Amino acid sequence: MLSKEQLRYWKESVDKIIKEHPLKFIQLEVTRACNLNCIHCGSPSEGTNFKEQLSREEIKKTLEKIATEIIDPNYFNHLMFVGGEPFSRRDLIDIIQDTSKIQVNGRRVYTNTQIQTNGTYLGDNPKLLDKLKELGITGFGISIDGLEKTHNLFRRGKDVFRKTYSAAQEAIARGFSVSISTVANQSNISELPVLSNLIRDELKPNFWRIMLLDPIGRARLDKNYLLSPEQVKKIIGFIYKEHVEHVKEVYQEGRGTKIELGCGGWCGEQLEGMIRPYLWHCISGISMLGIMYDGAIGGCTNISRDFIEGNIRTDDITKVWNDRFEKFREFDWKKIDECQDCKEFEFCDGGPMHYRLGDRKMIFCLYQTLENDMDYRGMATNEVLKTKAGN
Ligand code: SF4
Ligand code: SF4
């Protein structure tokens, strides 16, 4: 458990970052198109107007502008192309090429550029990895959501697991940084220990990030996959055990797979630091900028459309980042319902932005689920939840 001094020190550092909000990560949703139709997709193509998709030229100009006006190279960490499935875009290679050439004062800006993918295109075309390496791609986020049968069912495609796994193997063999993400849900909880042997002991990526299935996107419609409080506790318990048994060594020795809970929210002093090697705070709009497929600007690409603060086609993105992101950097507006009197608010600042809706309501809290059995399944209805899929 963390000491009061550790918590105070961490809180001061977070407050400083919030105040200065140096841009560290960009998520750029290059498309909403996808070759799969996954059950849990948070960026579904339904409700998407594909005619609105950003052009290659718009993406290039925007990244140039951000490089010149917003990025401080001393802080900037990485640009991630996300989707949909980024490889669904025929001009993805051109976009990557344009991005790799962007310079400020003779120095390349986007030197750490990664792609979040379902892995199937790369599984079918492993030689593409060599080309991507030449163009400066440094890593991939690749999704594996269970053992073969479960993954294929969840991703609703034949042979998807084999292609995805092979893509990850090929990328690791070529020295890319690979982060495997797994969306924990009712169908794969019992497989996590075996999946751990496969991912941690055989595949050996740099990271294995386990996420909780969120009641947003398509998943909000399918209560068969949503998690009960007991199941959430089981998943957190599994990650905790992995940390105690393996992850500490990985950090000490500097090699092996780092396992962590991805973006689930603050989980209290007892567990923070034990299920990931840092203390959680949502970075949306603080050190993360999200640009959606149609140019909408937000703090990250996973948030509700209710928190879109501009569009690159009509607004100056630098002004949006500097002047319109108060909702991401000041948190008193979140003090309603469970958050109102929560003793954790001081550290948590009202949880992940992707769990908030425009009426300020929160759809899930990890801490309350662990402490008080908060159950989001009853809240997951069409009427209550708006997702970023619609406009
Ligand atoms: S909104 Fe969610 S996905 Fe985005 S940075 Fe915050 S916790 Fe992560
Ligand atoms: S109730 Fe609100 S402040 Fe408390 S832990 Fe949950 S999200 Fe954070």
Image: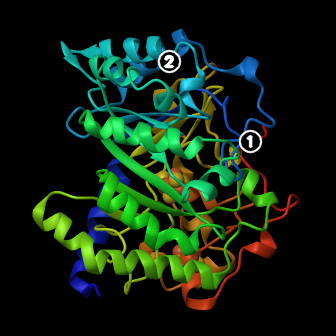
Q: Residues within 10 Å of mark 2 (few under 14, many from 20)?
A: some
Q: Please name the residue that numbered disc 1 is placed on.
A: 389
Q: Residues within 10 Å of mark 1 (few under 14, many from 20)?
A: some
Secondary structure beneath dot 1 equals loop
Q: Is residue 273 at all visible to an observer of this figure?
A: no
Vertical placement of residue 269 versus 242, above or below: below
- Residue 29 versus residue 300: which sits nearer the camera? 29
User: In the picture, residue 223 is in which quadrant?
Assistant: bottom right
Q: Amino acid at mark 1?
A: Ala
Q: Please name the residue that numbered disc 2 is placed on.
A: 92
Q: CA distance from mark 2 to mark 1?
A: 22 Å
Residue 15 on image: x %, y %: 34, 62
Vertical placement of residue 56 versus 172, above or below: above
In percent of the image, x 39 and y 38: which residue is there? 140
Q: Is residue 261 at all visible to an observer of this figure?
A: yes
- Ligand 1 within 8 Å of the CB at mark 1: no
Q: Amino acid at mark 2?
A: Leu
Q: Residue furthest bottom?
A: 372
Quarter of the rendered image showing ligand 2: bottom right
- Ligand 1 within 8 Å of the CB at mark 2: no
Q: Residue furthest left?
A: 253
- Residue 384 versus residue 189: which sits nearer the camera? 189
Dot 2 or dot 1, earlier in sequence = 2
Q: How is the image coloured?
A: rainbow
Residue 247 on image: x %, y %: 26, 70
User: In the picture, residue 73 is in which quadrant?
Assistant: top left
User: In the picture, residue 315 is in which quadrant?
Assistant: top right
Quarter of the image for the C terminus: give it: top right
- Left or right of 388, for residue 77: left
Secondary structure beneath dot 2 equals helix
In percent of the image, x 60 and y 41: which residue is there? 159
Residue 341 on image: x %, y %: 59, 85
